[in-house]
Every structure is written in structure tokens, then in C-alpha cells.
Amino acid sequence: MAHTNTGTLGGFWNNAYTEPKRKYRWIMYIDGIPYWTIKKVDKPSYTITTAEHQFINHKFYFPGRVEYNEIGFTIVDSTNPDAAETLRQIIFASGYRLPRTEMSATQSITKLGAVTSLGNITIQMISGGGVAGSGANDGNSAVQELHKEGHVLECWSLHNAFITSVELGDLDYSSDDLNEITVKLRYDYAVLNDPNDITGELHVSTTKQFGGQTATVGNQNEPNRQD
């Protein structure tokens, strides 16, 4: 496969207009949890299973199903709103009840309850202009055309997500760190750059080379298959 030279390496690193996505420029939106309390999150990932066929002294493999992996995020245990109480309410809204009576002990979590209580979840990578309303477009920025407020560089939407684990942290007399809560989520699948789920303006490249051919990507357009 031939490699296409789209420019010199020195030109890339010396071009002030070129800026990669940054790990610290992101916002995660979850109903009931302020985004400024979420300090770390895993991006969606997936695994493609394989089927094996063995013939005498050789093994051959075939791609199977796509399985999306759990993600986790960490929040600061705030008091207003109370993060631990918010998560408890989400679990109870999923259908769980304490077994205080024989009647309440018959209730259980349902998928509809677990998904609805958590609401829509998106992870958005943003530009240097910040979120919409940040003031980056007030005319005082020298790069407002390149880093507008509300520019979304990448957006992941988790479909049918629900909580699988909540770790409330530990307590330690010798530590003055902020208390943190770690939450894990399971979801059916994740969609990249769905315009219906983006809170700002999607700002991504719309063409890419696949197998030597140009395909349109982003804005919910799927790459053309090459088989």
C-alpha cells in the first residue's frame, strides 16, 4: 500500500494553525451531575471477537462480533449537589429498593429504569474556544475564527447506558486529597459525531482516505465499504 505524503513533518509542527485534540479539553454531560465535577473519563472502546479455524499445522482467523467495552469516569464528591446522594437516587430510580419489607424486596432494576434514570450521555472534545457562551467570540481574541466558542471536535454518544459499579472512595487521616467517586457504565453501542447529540457546532474534517479512496466521514456519514 502506497503512503501519501500530505506535507513535511516540519511544516506540521511549525504550523500554528495545526493543533491536535488535547486530552484536557473535554466535557462530559450526564443528567444530574455537573460537568465541572467530572475530572476523568474513559473514551468508548470496542473489541472485535475472532473465530478460529485450525487446519493441520496452521490457524486461520475470521472477524466476529463488535463488543463495546465498559467505560469509567471519576467525579469529585461534591456536597452541593451531593454527588453520593445523586448516584443513590439514580440507582433507586432504576428500580432498586432496600429490602425493608417483604413487598419492597420484590422490586428489581429494569433496563428501561436504569437507562432512563441516567439520561443521555455524551463526551465532547472541544476547541480552545470552550463551550457555547464562553465569551471567546467577543472580538478580543486573536484566534476567534479558529477557536470559536462551542466548537466540538469530537463527540461520543452512549446509547442505553446504565451504571454497573459505584466506588465511593476511601477515607484516610493522612491525606488531604479531595474525595472522589468512580463510576462504571455499560452501554449497547456508541456513536461518533451524531449531530443530534452535540451541544455546540460540529467542527471536524469531512473527508478521509480509505484504501486509497476518498470517503465522507463525520456528521453521521459512514465511510464507504471497500469490499
Image (cartoon, grey):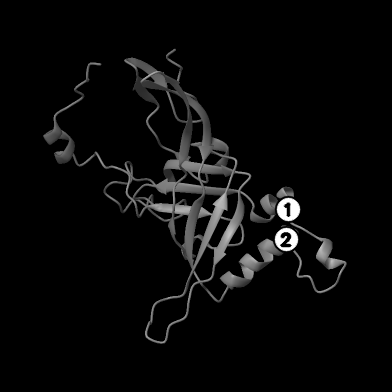
For mark 1, give the secondary structure.
Answer: helix
Residue for point 46% across, 18% down = 224
Q: Is residue 81 in view?
A: no
Residue for point 16% across, 40% down = 13
Closer to the camera in the image, 219 or 59: 59
Placement of the C terminus among the 4 image quadrants = top left
For residue 215, which quarter of the picture?
top left
Q: Position of residue 185 (x, y in %)?
A: 56, 53
Q: Relative to 187, is 36 on the left or the right?
A: left
Q: Residue furthest right?
A: 103
Q: Is residue 27 in view?
A: yes
Give the answer, above or below, for where 223 lies relative to 172.
Answer: above
Q: Amino acid at mark 1?
A: Gly
Q: Amino acid at mark 2?
A: Ala
Q: Position of residue 86 (x, y in %)?
A: 63, 67
Circles 1 and 2: CB atoms closer than 8 Å: yes
Q: Position of residue 172 (x, y in %)?
A: 43, 83
Residue for point 46% across, 47% down = 124
Residue topped by disc 2: 93
Q: Relative to 18, is 196 on the left or the right?
A: right
